[in-house]
Image (spheres, rainbow, N blue to C red):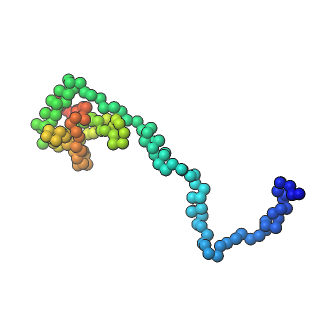
Amino acid sequence: MKSDRIRENDYEDMINLPHHISANHLPMPVEDRAAQFAPFSALTGYEDAVRETGRMTCERKELEEDAKDILDSKLQMMRKRSGERLPVFVTYFRPDTKKEGGEYVTVTGYVKTVDLYRRRLVVEDDTANLLEIDLDEISELEGEYLW
């Protein structure tokens, strides 16, 4: 009766045989062999979904009537002087495209246009890029000429 344990000399006839090399297939490059041992992810995109869920957003704050009136006055001033290339700091709420909430962003540039019909403020930055900002998303306007 043969023991369940493998004895050292059970494989002695195979130990010194030469390594088999296929006559039909080229050997796999060493760089590609590493991929065989890479961790397997059964849920493709799971890590991205977890990262997205953990990304922080903030809620849009509703301005009080006094603040809205002040913003409106500043916009009117900017509209009258929009051809003068006056510097401005605009803080506005940018809604998130993937989940509820968003973030407050402050940009620096020059007032190009205050478009009341489309409700947009067009700001030109130092590199001549134009940024259109929804007037309803603006929370703060600062500039030397805006009292």
x and y, in percent, of residue 122 in the image:
20, 43
Instruction: Please give left or right for residue 92 compared with residue 113 in the image.
Output: right
Q: Is residue 41 above or below residue 73?
A: below
- Report the residue that reaches farthest toward the bottom: 23
**Residue 118 visible in the picture:** yes
x and y, in percent, of residue 23 in the image:
64, 76
Q: Which of 92 and 20 lies nearest the eye of the viewer?
A: 20
Which quadrant would residue 124 be assigned to in this image? top left
Which quadrant would residue 100 be assigned to in this image? top left
Residue located 22% across and 26% down the image: 67
Residue located 19% across and 40% down the image: 120
Q: Quadrant of the C terminus?
A: top left
**Residue 85 visible in the picture:** no
Q: Quadrant of the N terminus?
A: bottom right
Q: How many marks?
A: 0
Q: Which of 113 and 25 lies nearest the eye of the viewer?
A: 25
Q: Is residue 32 above or below residue 113?
A: below
Instruction: Please give left or right for residue 109 compared with residue 16 in the image.
Output: left
